[in-house]
Amino acid sequence: DSGVTQTPKHLITATGQRVTLRCSPRSGDLSVYWYQQSLDQGLQFLIQYYNGEERAKGNILERFSAQQFPDLHSELNLSSLELGDSALYFCASGGGGGTGELFFGEGSRLTVL
Amino acid sequence: AQTVTQSQPEMSVQEAETVTLSCTYDTSESNYYLFWYKQPPSRQMILVIRQEAYKQQNATENRFSVNFQKAAKSFSLKISDSQLGDTAMYFCAFKPPRSQGNLIFGKGTKLSVKP
């Protein structure tokens, strides 16, 4: 158990819809990272938050947004969904200290029909 | 920009044998972290081993060891005494030392351990 909690584990929705993925980081971790894993693109970094503030942005579409709340949990909002958004979305926390290690949640599997 | 390359999309090994997975990376940083993560069919991302670039000694974790060649920007993973449970996708990853730095992953190597 990594200590990172993601919900939901599975989500099926239709094109054009909007979904929200939730992540609770490990106790004590201030950073939250979101990654997208699709078959043809591998693991792509989307965005990082640190103590409520956006710290780094990767290949995140404008239809996607995220935020980190005062209790440090984070939400990734995906809107106007397209078939190509079907993927596994991972949240991770950590990245600091002496190891740089990221701890991953189990992922949220999104299927857009 | 940093990049990570895994040139072996798929590999297979017999149980109890040794296998080496390759990884090269490109960076202008002098200090950084390197990782190997394992993703079994359960899809959980599990850290296998880490290496700090300032350490010359290669990291080892039980049956897993790395060959870190900083000048060549190479970071290979050796799995000894392969077990059926080692069957998984293996991802090599690079991370700059800053707290806001994210992990940059290679595309992965699918390892199959055969009985």
Image: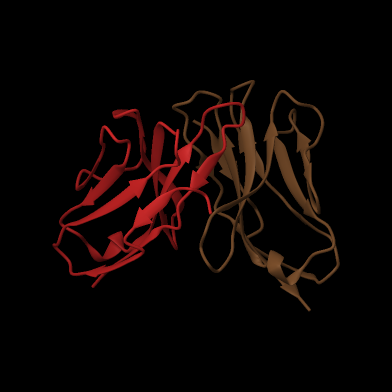
Q: Quadrant of residue B51?
A: top right
Q: How is the image coloured?
A: by chain
- How far across and how far down the image is residue A49, in percent? 34, 33
Q: Nearer the viewer, residue A75 or B93?
A: A75
The image quadrant where one finds the C terminus of chain A is bottom left
Name above or below for residue B74 compared with residue A112: above
Q: Residue at x 63, y 22 (%)?
A: B31
Residue found 52% across the figure and 50% down from its top: A2
Residue B53: which quarter of the image? top right
Residue B11, given in percent of the width and then of the height, sits at 70, 65
Indicate the position of residue B60 as horizontal and vertical percent values. Answer: 79, 43
Q: Is residue A56 visible?
A: no
> Total marks drawn?
0
Q: Residue at x 51, y 33 (%)?
A: A95
Query: In the rendering, what colour is chain A?
Result: red
Residue B23 is left or right of residue B95, and the answer is right
Above or below, B40 against A50 in this view is below
Q: Tell whether B8 sits left or right of A48.
A: right
Return the x and y of residue B36 as percentages of the image width and height.
64, 47
Observer able to see residue B78: yes
Left or right: B44, with B90 as reference point: left
**Foreground residue among B96 and B71:** B96
Tint applied to chain B in the drawing: brown
- The residue that appears at 44% across and 55% down in the rendered structure is A41
Residue B44 vs residue A63: left or right? right
Examine the rendered structure and indicate whether residue A18 appears above or below residue A51: below
